[in-house]
Image (cartoon, helix red, strand yellow):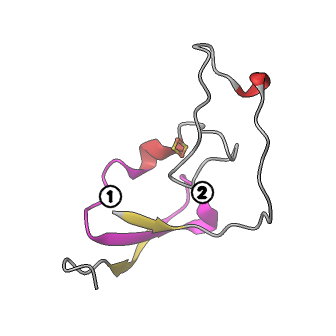
Amino acid sequence: MAREITHEERGPAVLDDDDKGDDGLIYVCRCGLSDSQPLCDGSHNATTDEEDGIVYKYANDDADGDRRVIGEIASDGE
Ligand code: FES
């Protein structure tokens, strides 16, 4: 599985102690769907049923948006 995300920021985000969760850790979003970038907000739960080898696009890069298949990843890496 993979998904296409549109990024508009042009620089890094600075994280500090205020970004820590109740457990003292900072959870950085890697799925690209969080509304609280660069922090995880749980939106990755929408990706749990994505199939390996398929590329998805979520409407408006929103985990609640319509999801469609936009491609496949070749199994030989090409
Ligand atoms: S990893 Fe993206 S919202 Fe959690």
Locate the C terminus by quadrant: bottom left
Q: Residue furthest bottom?
A: 78
Above or below — where is 61 with respect to 4?
Answer: above
Q: Residues within 10 Å of mark 1 (few under 14, many from 20)?
A: some
Q: Position of residue 7 (x, y in %)?
A: 69, 66
Q: Residue sitting at 50 percent across and 64 percent down? A: 66
Q: Residue sitting at 50 percent across and 52 percent down? A: 31
Residue 62 got which mark?
Answer: 2
At label 2, the amino acid type is Asp
Secondary structure of the residue carrying tag 2 is loop
> Which residue lies under the disc numbered 1?
50
Count of number-bearing discs: 2
Please tell me in which quadrant of the rendered image residue 52 appears.
bottom left
Q: Is residue 57 covered in magenta?
A: yes
Q: CA distance from mark 1 to mark 2?
A: 15 Å
Secondary structure of the residue carrying tag 1 is loop
At label 1, the amino acid type is Glu
Q: Position of residue 33 (x, y in %)?
A: 57, 53
Q: Residues within 10 Å of mark 2 (few under 14, many from 20)?
A: some
Please tell me in which quadrant of the rendered image residue 18 appears.
top right
Q: Residue furthest top?
A: 23
Above or below — where is 16 with respect to 42?
Answer: above
| Span colored in magenta | 47-66
Viewer-nearest residue: 34 or 16: 16
